Image (cartoon, helix red, strand yellow):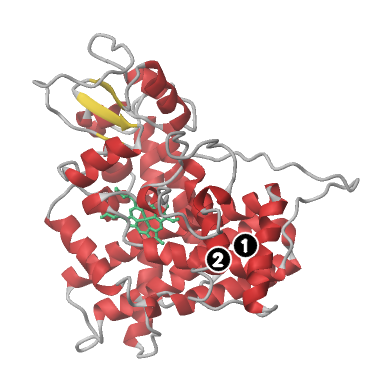
């Protein structure tokens, strides 16, 4: 977990040796993806769960433990702003994304608009969309199992599209969203950029050698703008025609007065809608994909989860609410969310997928084991606003898939099982 701060008079946490002026800029630029392997190694090498790297007046602090993150982000709650990211936000068109905004009135208004609609106790804002699109995913998996990754991405994108905008998740919209998400992830992966450390570089003419980042960011900006504009405009047109189904946009805008909305309201709702899409689609699909990967790699876990579900459902499809209290399935979901959390102090044997670590000898959820939900969705003021939606999607997708399928390794043309690579790619905005 990263954030930047400036407090030159206090001693800094340990970290890799800094070169004069540029500090660790080149160490960071050379980091291989996924970067968290190096961060964990630095933690061991410098015997600290707080690591400092920096250069050119900028600081980056890496928090390598739950305790450090909890203490600094949740308890002290003074690190809830966001660093300036010139290339991504100011040049790359992601300045509408409120999860990247510094602490302030614009962020507060955006977060409030979001939380006003997505209240955790009101499941009607998201669950009907989940049920519909998860059922559609099951049919697609049945017809075309080799494209499972596409179906997994599509299910969360479709849930988001209909829940946020109330529009049908047609290809013409989803392709706009996918193009923007991929281009933005590539822009992030191509960094870190010198312009983030020296913002004045953003004024270089784009044609100058060395200003390639500006040309790249400009292309991404066009796509990122389309991401929040295209579905939003379609949703507003629907609203004006009086035929809009319930959604975040329709609830936040209400009925138009004389066919128009105030500009300020339109802009805020458009930006918040775009942020929710960006924050919710890929994160949730990555969790659903992790679930499928785990089921392929650990068939004995799959069998136990299926037995538990069969006893309750007797072959029918699950509905929301009835599966989230099943202990074994809950332990599986916790283990899926723990996929990135490898602190041996909390989770012995951290690289093994063992739902049993969350269970007592009697097979109930062990309340003494740290719940990954407490970590995976962040801490404090900026904690994820979609936790309840992600969990609800994950439970229903997992329980539905286990009820109707045996999830197995694919086979090649000779009938030999293909071993999954188990590799994760670094991307994303949160
Ligand atoms: C498994 C799925 C998800 C994971 C692991 C996840 C994780 C996170 C994390 C770690 C943060 C940053 C918290 C911090 O800075 O302390 C965050 C923020 C955020 N998440 Fe999620 N999230 C998921 C799903 C969702 C969903 C489904 C939505 C929306 C429906 C969503 C919307 C957001 C938003 C808008 C923010 C920014 C909050 C702010 O800056 O005030 N996320 N999420």
The image position of residue 65, as x and y in percent, is: 35, 34
Q: Quadrant of ligand 1?
A: bottom left
The image position of residue 234, as x and y in percent, is: 40, 75
**Looking at the image, residue 254 lies above or below residue 263:** below
Residue 166: quarter of image: bottom left
User: Regarding mark 2 in the picture, which secondary structure is present there?
Assistant: helix
259 with respect to 224 (left or right):
left
Q: 346 or 360, which is in the foreground?
A: 360
4 with respect to 377 (left or right):
left
- Residue at (33% x, 42% y) in the render: 88
Single out the residue that lies furthest toward the left.
9
Which residue was labeled with disc 2?
Answer: 155
Single out the residue that lies furthest toward the right.
414
Residue 242: quarter of image: bottom left
- Residue at (20% x, 65% y) in the render: 112
**Would residue 35 be visible to someone looking at this image?**
no
How many other residues sit within 10 Å of disc 2, few (<14), some (14-19) or many (≥20)?
A: many
218 with respect to 60 (left or right):
right
User: Is the residue under label 2 in contact with that under label 1 (CB below 8 Å)?
Assistant: yes
Residue 248: quarter of image: bottom left
Label of residue 258 in the image: none
User: Regarding mark 1 in the picture, which secondary structure is present there?
Assistant: helix
- Residue at (15% x, 42% y) in the render: 78
How many other residues sit within 10 Å of disc 1, few (<14), some (14-19) or many (≥20)?
A: many
Q: 191 or 298, which is in the foreground?
A: 298
Which residue was labeled with disc 1?
Answer: 151
Single out the residue that lies furthest toward the front.
362
The image position of residue 374, as x and y in percent, is: 36, 51
Q: Label 1 to label 2, Cα distance in Å?
A: 6 Å
**Looking at the image, residue 395 lies above or below residue 208:** below
């Amino acid at each position: 977990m990263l954030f930047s701060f400036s407090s030159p008079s206090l001693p800094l946490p340990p970290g890799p040796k800094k070169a004069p002026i540029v500090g660790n800029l080149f160490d960071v630029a050379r980091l291989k993806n996924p970067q968290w392997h190096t961060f964990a190694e630095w933690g061991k090498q410098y015997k600290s769960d707080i690591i400092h790297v920096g250069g050119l007046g900028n600081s980056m602090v890496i928090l390598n433990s739950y305790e450090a993150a909890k203490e600094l982000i949740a308890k002290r709650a003074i690190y809830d702003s966001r660093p300036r990211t010139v290339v991504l936000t100011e040049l790359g068109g992601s300045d509408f994304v409120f999860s990247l905004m510094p602490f302030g009135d614009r962020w507060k208004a955006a977060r409030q608009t979001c939380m006003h609609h997505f209240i955790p106790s009101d499941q009607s804002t998201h669950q009907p969309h989940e049920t519909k699109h998860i059922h559609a995913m099951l049919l697609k998996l049945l017809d075309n199992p080799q494209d499972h990754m596409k179906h997994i991405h599509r299910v969360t994108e479709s849930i988001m599209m209909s829940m946020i905008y109330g529009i049908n998740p047609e290809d013409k919209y989803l392709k706009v969203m996918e193009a923007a998400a991929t281009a933005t992830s590539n822009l992030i992966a191509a960094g870190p950029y010198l312009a983030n450390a020296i913002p004045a570089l953003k004024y270089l003419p784009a044609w100058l050698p060395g200003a390639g980042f500006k040309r790249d960011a400009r292309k991404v900006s066009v796509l990122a703008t389309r991401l929040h504009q295209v579905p939003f405009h379609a949703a507003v047109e629907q609203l004006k025609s009086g035929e809009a189904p319930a959604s975040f946009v329709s609830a936040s805008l209400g009925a138009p007065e004389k066919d128009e909305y105030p500009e300020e309201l339109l802009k805020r709702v458009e930006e918040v809608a775009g942020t929710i899409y960006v924050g919710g689609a890929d994160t949730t699909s990555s969790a659903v994909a992790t679930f499928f990967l785990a089921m392929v790699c650990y068939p004995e876990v799959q069998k136990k989860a299926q037995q538990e579900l069969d006893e309750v459902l007797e072959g029918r499809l699950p509905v929301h609410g009835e599966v989230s209290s099943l202990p074994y399935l809950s332990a599986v979901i916790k283990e899926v969310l723990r996929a990135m959390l490898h602190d041996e102090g909390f989770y012995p044997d951290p690289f093994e997928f063992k739902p049993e670590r969350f269970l007592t000898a009697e097979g109930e959820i062990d309340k003494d084991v740290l719940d990954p939900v407490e970590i995976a969705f962040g801490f404090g003021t900026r904690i994820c606003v979609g936790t309840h939606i992600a969990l609800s999607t994950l439970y229903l997708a997992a329980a539905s898939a286990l009820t109707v399928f045996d999830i197995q390794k694919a086979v090649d043309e000779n009938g030999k099982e293909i071993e999954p690579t188990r590799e994760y790619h670094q991307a994303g905005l949160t």
